[in-house]
Amino acid sequence: MDSSAILAEIPRLRRYARAMLGDRAAADDLVQDTLERAWVRLHQWRTGSDMRAWLFGIMHNLRIDQLRRPGLPTQSIDADDFQVPTRATQNDELELREIESALSQLPDEQREVLLLVALEEMSYADIAATLGIPAGTVMSRLSRGRERLRLIMNGEQASARLRIVR
Amino acid sequence: MNPLPITEADLQAYVDAALPDARRSEVEDYLAAQPEEAGRVRAYMNQMQAIRSTFNPILDEPLPANLSALASAPPTAAVDAPRRPFLARWSLQRIAAGLLIALVSGFAGWLAHDRYPPAESLARMSPLPRRAAVAHAVFSPDVRRPVEVGAEQEDQLVAWLSKRLGTPVHPPKLGALGYELVGGRLLPGNVGPVAQFMFQDASGQRLTLYVSTENTTNQDTAFRFAQEGQVNVFYWIDGKFGYALSAGIDKGKLARIATAVYEQIEHK
């Protein structure tokens, strides 16, 4: 595993972690932990196998460890949080916010599969291998996640619009 | 021959463009006849698009330095191979320690304000001995968890602190003076991590060596002495390094130990 190969994967790890956690600082912490663990476990990586899948697998396991650990939930505050709610003409931004908020309402295991499909464009078989679950489970989480997201977004639209008026 | 019935898995794979051509056109025929299903599939496709356009810009963000640095092997990766499950747990503790130090230094400052004429005490104490004294006061009385990594894992401790400080750091050996290494920890300094090593003699008396790599004034100093409450501090600056040795023992004894520490560091 050489540096350029790892370096090439970092932006994708960050993108996925941000989408998964919804918080920049927490996401970058998770990426850092993932890279540190990857270097320590380098001997477990088989040359020629898919490094991206390997790294995502490490990140997935770290995330599970974190969830099992009790701790204070923290949230970083960045400039975005202070943006004044936008008017309805700016629909694009509104929709993007909606998808973020809707995603955060999905159960972890559904969001995870959905994001690996959407962002990483992994095959169902690769996702199953990365997460260590059967292929059928990937399909059922994907299908339930998508349907749930659709329902949330349908219901969300009304409340989001109401918020703008405030 | 009739096509196989369209399943939910087919629809999902259709959204992800993962169907062979023949099957895809069968699904399209099915959707043409089922407007409600077609609407659902369209919603799924829009979700995928919205997720991509929300998060793809992250790919173009410049990498934070701590992450791009990890594109190459940390100097320690090979040394402390598989056992480091404690690593991830530390961030909360670090934050807690940082908060604690902030609180205690605020409180110590307030105390000092009462006790000394402010100009004298606060101006004389540079931030280095002050922070070292506070860190000593916070951690050295701790009976159960005085350090984050104990001396029995000294290799890991050295590797870890060296990595986090970005430069090799080693605890001095003070056995000849009756002090054995207890362990060490990472602390927040002014702008980044600093290290604290703790030693203890047979009677349980503890001293701490505070190592900072944050000095930017580029002015070496000889030994200086400072006192914060019960804690005596000898400190000196050597290039980017700032060292501060703190203990609740008398000045003469502490000076002898400080000299030994200084000599060991100089002759590394």
Image: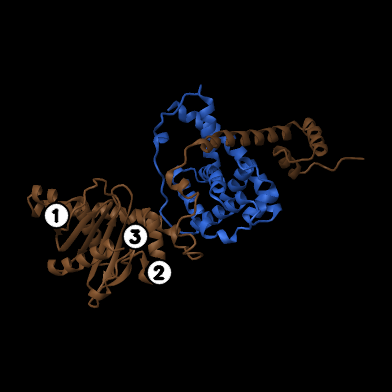
Chain colours: A blue, B brown
Q: Position of residue B113 (x, y in %)?
A: 11, 51
Residue shown at the point (48%, 59%) measured from the top left: B77
Give A71 or B139, whichever is nearer the viewer.
B139
Give A44 or B53, whichever is nearer the viewer.
A44
Mark 3 sits on what residue?
B169
Rounded to the nearest angstrom, the CA distance separating label 2 from label 3 is 15 Å
Mark 2 sits on what residue?
B153
Dot 1, how many residues are within 10 Å of its Cα: few (below 14), some (14-19), or many (20+)?
few
A22 displayed left or right of A111: left
Residue B261 location, quadrant: bottom left
Tell me the kind of residue under disc 1: Leu
Mark 1 sits on what residue?
B111
Q: Position of residue B123 (x, y in %)?
A: 13, 48
Q: Position of residue B162 (x, y in %)?
A: 38, 58
Which label sits on residue B171?
none
Rounded to the nearest angstrom, the CA distance separating label 2 from label 1 is 37 Å
Mark 1 or 3, closer to the camera: 3
Determine whether B180 is above or below B241 in the image: below
Residue shown at the point (14%, 60%) measured from the top left: B229
